Image (tube, rainbow, N blue to C red):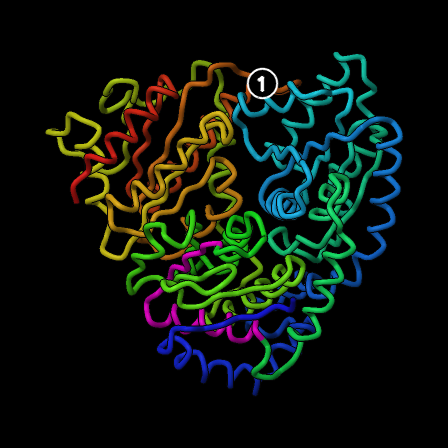
Amino acid sequence: MGISVDIVHDGLAEKARPLVDQLIADKVASKLAGQDATLWGPEAESESSIRLSWTTLHESSRPLVGEIEALSAELAGEGIDRVVLAGMGGSSLAPEVITATAGVPLVVLDTTDAGQVADALAGDLSRTVIVVSSKSGGTVETDSHRRIFEKAFTEAGIDAKRRIVVVTDPGSPLQKMSEEAGYRKVFTADPHVGGRYSALTAFGLVPAGLAGADINTLLNDAAAAFELLARDDENNPALWLGAAWGAAHAQGAEKVILADTGSGVKGFPDWAEQLIAESTGKEGVGLLPVAVENADAPGFVTAGTDSTPIAIGPDVDAAFMSTAGELGGLFLLWEFATAIAGRLIGINPFDQPDVEAAKKAARALLDQPVGGEAEAAPALTIGSVDVHQSGDWLPATATTLADVLNAFLAAAPDHGYVAVQAYLDRLDDASAAVLRPAVARASRLQTTFGWGPRFLHSTGQYHKGGHQNGVFLQITGAPAQDLEVPDRPYTLGVLQHAQALGDGQVLAEHDRPVLRLHLTDRAAGLVELTKAVQEVKR
C-alpha cells in the first residue's frame, strides 16, 4: 500500500488547490528532497542548513540495520530480551509507535514519576538492557533514569556496563561519558536531524530494532514514499497535506484534530503531535495538534471553524481529510507536509525557541537550597484536592471543585483550547486520560491531554510560542513512593514537582490562566475531579 492523502472537504480542497499549484511552480518538493535550506527565508537558513538530513534517512540509516541485528543477536545469546528505553520527546515517541505497530514489547520511560519508574525497575533485571537515548546528552529525565538503572543493576550483582546501550549525537557529553564508562554500545545519530524528525535515525531504529521490530521494512517503505514525495506534481500527497494545513490556518483553523480510524498504526497521533506542535507553534502562530480517542470523540465530531479533523486511516464522515500508508512512508509524508506547512505559515519549522524556558524554570527550583522560598499555600483544599491558580480568575465564592472548574473554563477565550497536563503515572493513573473527552464536552473547546513531563518535549513549545488562547489544567499528585536519583540532590518526586511548577510559572508569565490541582490522594482525587468535571455547566 502506498501513501495517500484524500481531502474530502470541498471547501478545503478548493482553498488548497492554488497553494499546491504555487508549491509545484516553486519546485518546493524537489528542493526539500534536495535539502535546500532557503525554502523558509533568510532568517531560517542558518538553522535549516543543519536540520535537513532527515529527507534521506531511508538511505543513510541502512548501515544501522546490520549493527542493530548483530547487537540484538548478542543480547539474545545472553538471555537478554527485555528492552527498556529511557528517552524523551523524539527519542521515545517514534520507537513507541514502531514497536506498538509491530506488536513487540518495549518498556518506555519518558516520565519522572517515581511509581512508573519503580514499575520498570521491578521487571526482571537479569533479562534487561536499557537504551539511554538523548541527542544533547544532558536531558535531565534520561540522565536520572540512567543513574537509577545503573545502580539497580550493580546492586543486583549485574555488570551494569554490559546492560547499557546509548544513542546520542556525536560529540555530546553523553558520548564521551559512555565511552569512558565502557558501556556496551554507543550509537551516534546524524546530528543534522532534529529530534522530532528523527524517527528513522538511530533514535528510532535502535530501541525498536532491539525490541524486535522489522526496521529494514520500515526503511524500505520510507524509500518507496520518498520517490513520490520528491516530485513537483499534483500527485504528491505531501503538497496537498501541507497546503491543506496552510489554507486552514489562514482561515483561522489553527487546530488539527487527529483520530485513528483503523490505520493499523498504533499511536501515530502521539508522534505527529510533537512533529506538528514543535515545528509550527512559534511567533504567535502555528497548528495545535489535538490527539483524540477515536472518530466519535468530542473535538472530532464537534469540530468548529477553528479546527480541521484528520483521519489516520480510512475516511469517516466527520473528517475533512485522511492519510493512509505503511508506517515508514507515513513518517516521511507527515515530515514533508509539516516542513511545507511551515513555509506557508511563515515560520522556521526546525527551531524550538520556547522549549528551554520551562526547563530553566525547573532547574531554578531544583537549585534552591533546602529551606529556600516555600511553595505558595493552596487557594482552597477540597476533599483530596489542593487548588492552586495563577491570575485573578478564581472568584472568592468558589467552594467546590465544579465551581473552580467553571471559573477556570470561563477564562478561556472563544475558539481557545484547554490543555490538561497530568504529572502522574501513565500506567497506574491511566484513568486520568478520561479527563480529555470529559473536559472537551464540558468546555465545548478543543482539549488536549498530555502526560507530564512528556508533553514538555512535545506540545510545550506550542503552549508558549503558538496562538496564545490556551488555558492550562495541571494535575499533580503526592507519590505513594519516591526514588532517589543517585549522586543528585533531588528525588524523582522533587524533580517531577519542579517540572510542573516551572512550566506553570512560564505559562503564567505569558498571561495564561493556570489551574493546578494537587491530589493529596491520587486515586481518590482523580475520582473527585472526574465527578466535578461532569458537573460543570458552561
Task: Please tell me which residue is depicted at 62% across the width and 37% down the height of the picture.
Answer: 139
Estimate the x, y position of residue 461 in percent, counting from the top left.
47, 50
Pick out the residue farthest to the left.
397
Q: Is residue 255 above or below residue 274?
A: below
Q: Is residue 318 left or right of residue 193?
A: left
For the C terminus, the quadrant is top left
For this rendering, which residue is in front, 39 or 437? Answer: 437
Q: Give the vertical position of 521 relative to 34 (above or below).
A: above
Residue drawn at x 41%, y 60% is 256
Position of 333 relative to 403 (above/below):
below
Assess whether residue 239 is covered by the magenta stretch.
yes
**Residue 183, image x and y in percent?**
82, 30
Residue 113: x, y in percent? 52, 26
Q: Is residue 184 left or right of residue 317?
A: right
For label 1, the crowd category at 10 Å Cα-Cα, with few meaning under 14, some 14 to 19 and many 20 or more, is few
Total numbered badges shown on the rendered structure: 1
Residue 232, picture quadrant: bottom right
The answer to whether residue 351 of the structure is visible from this angle is yes
**Mark 1 sits on what residue?**
489
Residue 260 relative to residue 156: left or right: left
Specify the amino acid type for callout 1: Pro
Residue at the image point whose x is 42% and y is 19% from the top:
478
Q: Is residue 308 visible?
A: no
Quadrant containing the N terminus is bottom right
Residue 55 part of the magenta segment: no
Specify start and end residues of the magenta stretch as a single range. 237-260
